[in-house]
Image: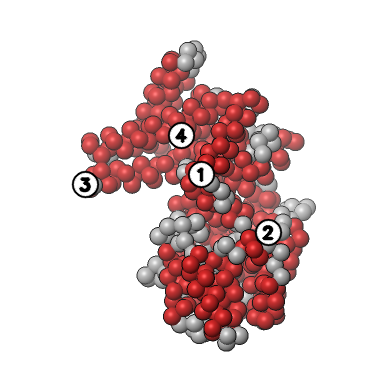
Amino acid sequence: MNPTASNAQGLVEHFFRHETGRLHGALIRLLGVHNVALAEDIAQEALLRAMRAWSMGGIPENPSAWITRVAMNLAKDALRHRGMAAGKEDAIAYHIEQTASPPVAAVGHARAIRDDTLRLLFVCGHPDIAPDAQVVLALKIICGFSTAEIASAFLATESAIEKQLTRTRQRIQDAGIAFELPEGADLAPRLDGVLGALYLLFNEGYKASAGDHLLREDLCDEAIRLATLLCEHPAGNTPRAHALLALMLLTGARFPARLDADGALLRLDEQDRAKWDRARIDRGLVHLAAATAATEFSEYHLQAGIAALHCTAPDDASTDWPRILAHYDALLKLKPSPIIALNHVVALARVHGPRAGLDALATLPDRDRLGQSHLLHAVAGDLHRRLDDHASAAASYRRALDLARVAPEQAHLARLLTHPAHPTHRATPGTPATPGKE
């Protein structure tokens, strides 16, 4: 692939991640929510045309305006072909004119883009759509996930996800769901779906399901951007939303120290805390304080509290593990899941010792299901190692290595197999609990 084509492909992939929600929102505002599938097709075709055109003729000065103009022209053609064009041409022409203007002069349009994205989030979170389908739809049309990525996140097949998306699009059309921001009593039921989608988006970036890279910071940054928009808007300015944003910021603050110079995974106790992003930590603590206005704490509050305890400890030895364990106790009661249970075992072992951790590991209610994840075996290996049972530790690490699908985790486990008695490797909950990976 020549350099121009390579640059064009990279830029289109960037736009697909960062502008999918904006483009879908603008198209759905013009076409109507009942035409969500048409909007997806138009956006996909616009991105494909961008890749072809930019590979041959170079990247335009304003790529965002270029893609939007192509998408709006395609929308106009589709409307004319379907006999739906009455009253739409002026709106499309206005939209094209606005996107071609310099961003600094388009304050009103920037606000419209913001609201379009939020409207699309709340369309996905409509109570007439099943909770799991809400998250799948949001990941597809707002966040730009492929069907394969969604299937991996939900431990499902691609065909099952595609069928679910088809049923959900039909449900939107049949229910006549409007492209609007909810108010009053209509807000809370939709907000749960919105927060769930943002949570899963962040977690897929924080720990990729597969591939050569553990971190996909573009996905995490997009989740933080959308959560920030949500908190800044009256429709989303709630304690739960602030708690989720706090969790994202406090967790994302550790990114600069999560990998070594060779791209291998570093656990919490190995990280150079001087590299943590103090600005993000400060922002996270501000949003965590805003979240305390809640009358009831959500799972996001508890997980953000755990992240805050890690971020505010000057070193690993100073971490308040008893309080972390208490948070996981509460999480297990509030929203039990296999991953939360596994993190609870890790915290329990830090407070009561590795033998207590192994005993708890043996009685996990979802042990069979977790046995297909490398995480269970990695934790078992760490606990055996701390008891100086290096044969059992090696067996567990070997099983974890067989199951690991991300290159930095594979390198980390291979290193543990080579040096099973390394004194710094301790079982540490490295990721927030992830609903899509349970």
Please name the residue that numbered disc 2 is placed on.
337
Q: CA distance from mark 4 to mark 2?
A: 35 Å
**Among the two numbered marks 2 and 3 on one chain, the one whose residue lies closer to the N terminus:** 3
| SS type, badge 1 | helix
Amino acid type, residue under disc 2 in the picture: Ser
Q: Nearer the viewer, mark 3 or mark 4?
A: 3
Please name the residue that numbered disc 4 is placed on.
23
Amino acid type, residue under disc 3 in the picture: Asn
* Viewer-proximal residue among 97 and 327: 327
Q: Nearer the viewer, mark 4 or mark 2?
A: 2
Q: CA distance from mark 2 to mark 1?
A: 23 Å
Quarter of the rendering containing residue 262: bottom left
Q: Nearer the viewer, mark 1 or mark 4?
A: 1
Please name the residue that numbered disc 1 is placed on.
158
Amino acid type, residue under disc 4 in the picture: Leu
Q: Mark 2 packing: few (<14 Cα in 10 Å), some, or many (20+)?
A: some
